[in-house]
Image (tube, rainbow, N blue to C red):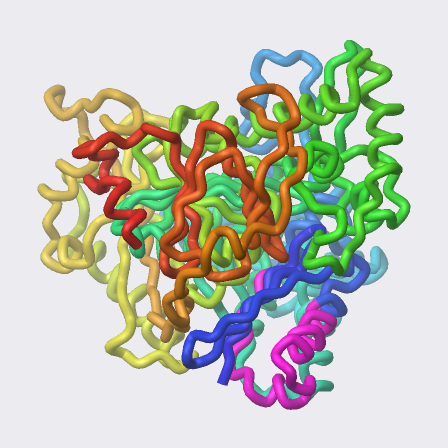
Amino acid sequence: MYKLGVDVGGTFTDFILISETGETSIHKTLSTPEDPSIGVLNGIHDLAKIIDLTTDGLIGRIDTIVHGTTVATNALLTSRGARTALVTTRGFRDGLEMRRGIREEQYNNHYRNVVPLIPRHLRLTVDERIDSRGDVVTPVDESELLAVAEHLAKEQVEAVVVCYMNAFKNNVHEAKTAQFLRQRLPSCFITASSEVLPSIRFYERVSTAAVNAYIGPVVADYLGSLTRKLDEIEFAGTLLIMQSNGGVVTPEVVRRSPAATVLSGPAAAPTAGAFYARLFDYKNCITIDMGGTSFDASLVIDGECVTSTDGSINRYRIALPALDIATIGAGGGSVGWIDHGGLLHMGPESAGADPGPICYDKGGTRPTCTDASLVLGYLNPDFFAGGRIKLNVERTKQLISEQIAERLDLSLLEAAAGMYRIINSNMAQGVREVSIERGYDPREFLIIVAGGAGPIHAAEICSELEIPMFVVPDVSSIFCAAGMLLGDLKHDYIHSYLVSFSHIDKSHFLELYEAMQETGTETLIKEGVDRDRIDFYPVLDLRYVGQYHEVQLPVSWQDVQVYDLKRIHRAFHCEHNRLFGYSLEEEGTEIELINVRLRVIGRTEKPRFLGGEQGPVSLDSALKERRPVYIPEEGAMKDVPVYDGDVRLGGHTIAGPAVIEKVNTSILVSDSYSCTIDTYGSCIVYKKNAFPDGYRRGHSHQSVEKITDG
């Protein structure tokens, strides 16, 4: 039997197929933006041929498919969601547009607010009110709801958001309105804010619910198309969808809360990063994932992926728990362009899969990062994607010369090298965003490199950040697809409880957690998880009285059960000091509780990624050729050896400069680096002479000698 991980990206769709014995097949196919499910089926057909089975023979042996998708993300980025309406409390019609009343760029007089997902003429109000204690002040009048329903039917809306003031305290009005509208608008996707995010703060709640409704019909259509196609090829196993929080859920859950999948694809990288970090005995790592369209950087601390509820996509606020991932427009398809001042930029616009980079020869006319890598010798024009895609070198050189080099009065090589340096600098800034800006030193982390394009750029990114070592796993080119097979079933719950720490009602505090625990347990048992495989991870949103923002403090389930507030009190001061450089413990400043959260995890059986150790093959037999490659340290082309990375090189060390070429990626071992391949095919690339005997590095207290010993 097999498990299949599928990651639909902007340019490529990645697949990893793993048998019960750990035999692994990886594959990439071009994505099909018009209907991503077509690319998924194309890949399944290709995999069947790769392992010498018919499609029917393979699909009958797949018991689980875990799928990550960018459908929700793309709908937000391209503003191609559903025609959506909002029903809210009278007087709060413009809450979605007013946001928090704070400009994102406070000192930019030309700043303009993001265009709301719901236009003003589709924001309707109802004369209802619940006060801050949850008591009904003004009940909902059904005659008003009938008028609202008739108006929305005339406007032919496809989705409706119901978000009333203080519904997080008492959702009786939202529930009544949602039920009323579902009966009269059966074809509409109806979202009540209390069903998506039952927490304090009106803007966060209405924005998250608006996103949920806006992408709801799009995600539902895609899941419908995918499940129909899987039914047609008689797939009888389990289909799971990756969430933004790094967990997996069933398609039924996604249909109710599609906003939980806006980072569905990138969320799998930290999960895989945590797995590989443990293999190298590291607790902390940074995963960097460079694909065709974007670059993602994320943190793993103490073996756990860092989570945030302060996320946004295309400036639209989403307050659901999601892995803390910095995403920038820097991928293999990122377009190089020159601004009015004559400065060269890379991205964020991408050539995507259609037409793609110039070198793909599919009609692309704008120079991209991949085109620069071809000119610099990092890519083999006859072996890209294992030879399935022949790269057009001459046309690539011609258009880079015309559009970049000649306009900047540079040679072709200087222009391509400039494109390479700029995108590397952009990605280094992405790493700073998830590390330095959050109080962590990236030099103390294991850097794990993923994505088809990532290993070509990793050495220069690490050099800029003064990081002496990085690891390229054997499955780096389909890292997110691999991470999907490592995800557990996860559900997040939240209750707002605004109270000073010294006045917490113990019985109410414990009742909130017991209710969330019971709901999460019942949900996971229905999804087939045994009770003894369910874990609970509580989080408290705390702040000093008078502060505007709160700190999310993970606490142990034991601390909650025994109600150890003193321990929680001390932990908050320490975390506040780590984040902001000070605490108010000595001043005796009161702490305020805002929300109680609980993540409920159902641990799944993990596949064996490492099917067996790789026996050694001599370096001489793995040498494919020597070819000119751009060496950043020298600023010039140099003939370097190119090794076949798909043969078993475990135990060998390759001194740079060199290129290790695989079917789905290439690894640049620059002049100042060496690379040791471990017994499972992962490449440990490190600065020459960076690790003298006895040197211990970072939080891991582990020397490079131990790592390179496998």
Q: Residue at x 80, y 47 (%)?
A: 391
Q: Is residue 222 left or right of residue 706?
A: right
Please say if 583 is above or below 568.
Answer: above
Which quadrant would the C terminus be assigned to in this image? bottom left
Q: Is residue 81 above or below residue 299?
A: below
Note whether residue 152 is visible: yes
Which of the 4 quarters of the picture holds residue 663? Answer: bottom right
Residue 242 covered by magenta stretch: no
Choose between 355 and 543: the one closer to the eye: 355
Residue 93 in sight from this viewpoint: no
- Rendered location of residue 558, percent (x, y): 14, 58
The answer to whether residue 284 is left or right of residue 433 is: left
The part of the chain drawn in magenta is 40-68
Residue at image location 14% in from the left, 53% down from the top: 559
Q: Residue at x 10, y 49 (%)?
A: 564
Which quarter of the picture shows residue 67? bottom right
